Image (cartoon, helix red, strand yellow):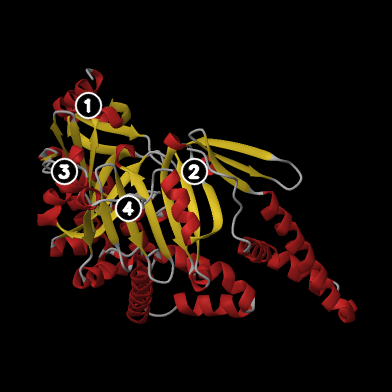
């Protein structure tokens, strides 16, 4: 099916100009203040800059066209140098319909095409389109909503299954599954604080803060962590609002967002692995979050290395029925065979012994070192949970890996989705008859999954299972 050449909505000129201004705000500001002695000419300086940006983006918009031709999506672009790009429709992994607050106010959207190529080469963005035009393009690419497709009938509609978040689960999800990113927030604040306050005042405040007595410092840190957690929960609330998963025989349609919305379609045959994640709060309350690793340049949830958020929060007892409906090829038992007892002892000794030595040294030389000893039982508890969470399950062509860093994760994949498989053994592991298995799957971030300290017999069994395939 062919279509005529189309351009983006004319609002793209203004949108791209605003984006250019955001990138140039710092150098333009420096230039402006450098020539401040010619203050009488500042209006001309600003107007000339805006005129150049608008003219350039107008020609950029004028030269950008797209069409569907002979089973390929054809894009022409470039102001001075002409670029022609053809993308075969079968290589388009997902189509994402996104909108921010500005675009929503004027009834426009952004369309993002993700291909099976790496993210830095595969993404194609149609920055500004009308809702009608975006729907037309999605249907031409085979990623449209069946309800809106011409000729949709009752049989097509009946093959769709819709999962929605209940209000109670949605509120709970914002507090248990939010990506806190505390360190990132602190680093971002610290890197920009120097531009807002004098360095001398900033350094003096920092030194006064770290010299506070532990009885004051620890509650302050806890309050900071709680505040950041609450802020992150609010962000997650707006990001996951109105979450809806629609399942058809060939694909998923995912809608989410309150202020900024996103509609995405993902072909189910591109799924390489399913990840079931449980934070400690979710484990205590019997919930989990489901992600999918898909081939191609997925640009959906960067906090999970580019994985697709399939469902934000689900009761663990409903997981089996959910997988049976959403992606039956990966459904089945997720109960894993645990690593042996000597593996758990070995895993605990690796971090605990060096940490004990460090704590003894700090306590000997610094009085505040005594306040760090609670870290030891916390570390031992974490390593114990990590060892208890490690394991695997093998059922025909289906493999499950279970592991934990902070969040307990169970990964489900199929033999034909594994790119490479490695079984290896260190010198110490050889003494304990243990081994480590690692597998690599082709996803947007090239994921590697690993289970350590397996029985050597189990490690050999898994390697033989993959090699015989």
Mark 3 = which residue?
344
Q: Of the two numbered discs 1 and 3 on the same chain, state the one appearing first in sequence.
A: 3
**Label 2: few (<14), some or many (≥20) within 10 Å?**
some
> Which residue shows up at 51% across the image and 41% down it?
122
Left or right side of 396 for 57: right
Q: Counting residues from the N terminus, which is met first, the one under dot 4 or under dot 1?
A: 4
SS label for mark 4 = strand
Label 2 or label 3, whichever lies nearer to me, is 2
Residue 389 % position (x, y): 17, 47
Mark 2: which secondary structure? helix
- Rendered position, 137 above or below 414: below
- Give me the disc on residue 189: none
Work out whether residue 207 or residue 75 is closer to the camera in this orientation and state it. Answer: 75
Q: Which residue is mark 4?
A: 253
Residue linked to disc 2: 119
Q: Earlier in the sequence, mark 4 or mark 2?
A: 2
Locate residue 91 relative to residue 54 in the image: left or right. left
- Place residue 434 in its image quadrant: top left
* x and y percentages locating residue 229 in the rendered image: 34, 72
Of labels 4 and 1, the one closer to you? 4
Q: Residue tagged by mark 1? A: 430
Instruction: From the viewer's side, name the closer residue of 326 and 24.
Output: 326
Disc 4/disc 2 C-alpha distance (Å): 21 Å
Secondary structure beneath disc 1? helix
Please report the residue visible at 50 percent of the width from the left and 58 percent of the height from the top: 110
């Amino acid at each position: 099916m062919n279509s005529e050449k189309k351009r983006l909505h004319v609002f793209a000129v203004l949108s791209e100009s605003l984006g250019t201004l955001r990138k140039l705000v710092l150098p333009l500001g420096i230039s402006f203040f450098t020539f401040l002695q010619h203050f009488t000419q500042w209006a001309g300086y600003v107007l000339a800059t805006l005129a150049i940006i608008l003219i350039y983006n107008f020609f950029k918009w004028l030269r950008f066209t797209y069409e569907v031709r002979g089973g390929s999506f054809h894009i022409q672009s470039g102001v001075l140098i002409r670029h022609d790009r053809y993308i075969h429709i079968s290589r388009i992994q997902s189509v994402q319909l996104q909108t921010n607050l500005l675009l929503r106010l004027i009834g426009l959207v952004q369309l993002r095409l993700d291909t099976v190529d790496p993210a830095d080469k595969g993404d194609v963005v149609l920055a500004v389109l009308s809702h009608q035009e975006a729907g037309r393009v999605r249907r031409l690419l085979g990623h449209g909503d069946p309800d809106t497709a011409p000729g949709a009938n009752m049989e097509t509609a009946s093959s769709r299954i819709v999962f929605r978040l209940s209000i109670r689960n949605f509120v709970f999800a914002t507090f248990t599954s939010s990506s806190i990113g505390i360190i990132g927030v602190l680093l971002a604040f610290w890197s920009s604080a120097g531009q807002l306050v004098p360095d001398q005042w900033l350094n003096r405040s920092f030194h006064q803060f770290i010299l506070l007595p532990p009885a004051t410092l620890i509650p302050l840190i806890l309050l900071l962590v709680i505040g950041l957690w609450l802020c992150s929960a609010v962000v997650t609330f707006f990001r996951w609002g109105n979450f809806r998963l629609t399942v058809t025989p060939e694909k998923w349609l995912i809608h989410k967002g309150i202020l900024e919305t996103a509609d995405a379609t993902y072909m189910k045959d591109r799924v390489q692995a399913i990840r079931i994640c449980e934070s400690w709060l979710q484990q205590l309350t019997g919930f989990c979050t489901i992600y999918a690793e898909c081939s191609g340049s997925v640009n959906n949830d960067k906090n999970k290395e580019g994985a697709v958020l399939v469902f934000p929060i689900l009761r663990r007892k409903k997981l089996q029925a959910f997988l049976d409906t959403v992606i039956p090829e990966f459904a089945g038992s997720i109960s894993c065979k645990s690593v042996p007892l000597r593996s758990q002892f070995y895993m605990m000794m690796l971090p605990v012994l060096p940490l004990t030595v460090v704590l003894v040294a700090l306590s000997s030389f610094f009085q505040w070192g005594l306040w760090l000893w609670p870290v030891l039982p916390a570390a031992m508890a974490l390593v114990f949970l990590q060892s208890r969470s490690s394991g695997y399950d093998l059922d025909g062509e289906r493999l499950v890996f279970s592991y934990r860093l902070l969040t307990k994760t169970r990964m489900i994949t199929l033999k034909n989705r594994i790119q490479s498989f490695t079984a290896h053994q260190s010198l110490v592991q050889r003494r304990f008859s243990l081994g480590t298995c690692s597998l690599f799957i082709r996803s947007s971030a090239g994921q590697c999954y690993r289970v350590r300290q397996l029985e050597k017999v189990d490690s050999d069994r898994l390697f033989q299972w993959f090699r015989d395939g």
